[in-house]
Image (tube, rainbow, N blue to C red):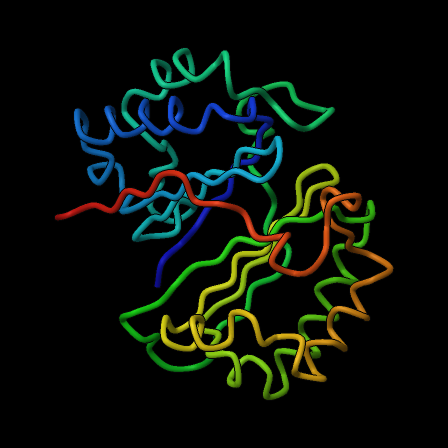
Amino acid sequence: MVFRNVIVCHMVPGSEQIVGGVFGHYDQATRPQDLGVIGRYLLSHHDLYIHVIEREQDPRISGQTRGLPAFQKIAEEIGPYVTPYPRYWKNPSDSVAKEFYHWAPEGEPPADTTLTVIVGRIKPGAEPDVARVFAESDAGSLPTDLGVTGRWLYSIDDVYVHLLEQETSAAEATRDQHGDKPAFGKVMQDLGPYIEPYRPETWQGPQDSVATVFYRWQAQD
């Protein structure tokens, strides 16, 4: 079981290569795995920076809550490009999105999975309603039909982040076919009062809500 934390910030569009390079340097120069970090994704979506940190244990149990030994140096180097998102931001912990729903099927997950990060805007206080919509859907056959092996929902200020883990073969086979499934259409309809695209003026379909990975690191030992 992989435990994930999600950090959400503003990012200067076009700075992905610079920010990814900073993490690439320190992921090689230090050993994040010594702090329980086994992987990370850096993603962008319009002016958003999304950092998914993967750990081998729940940090609330292990006590290993730091993301990198060189945290302060990284913060200084990416500071011109990555800035806080929440209006209530006071310290770095305020950039950590709050998990409000998690689902996974019973049994051991397959070894070959793909993680997709979906981004939108959430109506303030709508987390229980969004969780209810997904709980109802996840109780049916749709997750199995789409090869879903895990789902995590997060919110921070007005941003909604959906981590969708699928069997890789199923993800590739169903990437552009969600709209063909009535159950998927019902989920989208039920979410309508609570979730909207991050940039409605440019959104044309579900794929426009998928964040783009610009850096990926996994521990080798």
**Which residue is more in the foreground, 179 or 6?**
179
Which residue in the rendered view is the most extreme toward the bottom? 141
106 up-or-down from 187: above or below: below
**Residue 193, percent across and down?**
87, 59
**Which residue is more in the foreground, 209 or 192?**
209
Q: Quadrant of residue 68?
A: top left
167 up-or-down from 99: above or below: below
Left or right, 220 with reference to 198: left
54 up-or-down from 96: above or below: below
**Residue 142, percent across and down?**
60, 83
216 up-or-down from 23: above or below: below
Left or right, 221 with reference to 115: left
**Which residue is more in the foreground, 219 or 147?**
147
Which residue in the rendered view is the most extreme toward the left? 221
Determine the residue positioned at 25% across, 46% down. Answer: 218
Determine the residue positioned at 39% across, 63% down. Answer: 114
**Residue 1, percent across and down?**
35, 64
